[in-house]
Image: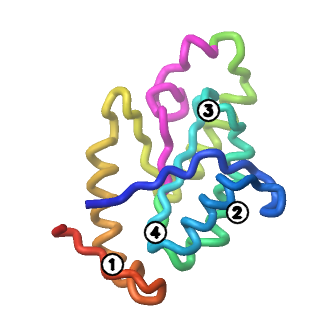
Amino acid sequence: RHIVTDTPGLLWRPDEDRNKIERLAIATLEHLPTCVVFVTDLSGLCGTSVEDQLAIRAELRERFSERRPWMDILSKSKLVPALGGELCPDLEGLWTEDDAAEAASTAKELLTAGAIPVSAEECHGVEELKGLVTRLLVEHRQTLEGEDGFEPFDPGT
């Protein structure tokens, strides 16, 4: 079993400007035995620019990737032309060539780094994601125990 904590609302800003929810999300990553699964949305529908998502990703990677297992996910992949999907009809006329170029370059960069494209609505990549998360947690069992004072992860429970 896995416990999943969604840490929504992290914005690209200094720690001292973050609200209680953002500080709690950072504290969760800091103090619990975690595997970081960073979800990037290139569809233009999440309300946070790709540039800001990448800035948040860079900050968290700098803070946690050396001591926590890390996995990148590209969400809503069926709505991102650069990932083989089709542009959402809601974005017709709003999606610029710059948006398409930014999505394509970001997709290429993250896919090269091992990101997994997923689209939950179509169940695209979901089983692969579940399998990879399980394998990552099992492989890093020792990383996730001990120094934080938590019991070892037991995939059989």
User: How far apart are the alpha carbons under marks 4 and 2?
Assistant: 16 Å
| Residues at circles 3 and 1 in contact by the CB criterion of under 8 Å | no
| Range shown magenta | 72-91
Q: Secondary structure at mark 1?
A: loop
Above/below status of 51 relative to 141: above
Q: How is the image coloured?
A: rainbow
Residue 13 percent location from the top left of the image: 80, 54
Q: CA distance from mark 3 to mark 1?
A: 33 Å
Quick one: label 3 or label 2, which is nearer the N terminus?
A: 3
Q: Quadrant of the N terminus?
A: bottom left
Observer-side mark, 4 or 2, equals: 4
x, y percentage for residue 19?
74, 53
Identify the residue under disc 2.
59
Q: Is residue 96 shown in magenta? A: no
Q: Residue at x 41, y 40 (%)?
A: 118
Q: Which residue is mark 3?
A: 46
Of label 3 and label 1, which has the lower sequence position?
3
Which residue is at 47% across, 84% downward?
A: 148
Of the two numbered discs 4 and 2 on the same chain, state the one appearing first in sequence.
Answer: 4
Residue indicated by mark 1? 141
Give the CA distance from mark 1 to mark 4.
10 Å
- Give SS at disc 3: loop
> Tag 1: residue type?
Arg
Q: Earlier in the sequence, mark 1 or mark 4?
A: 4
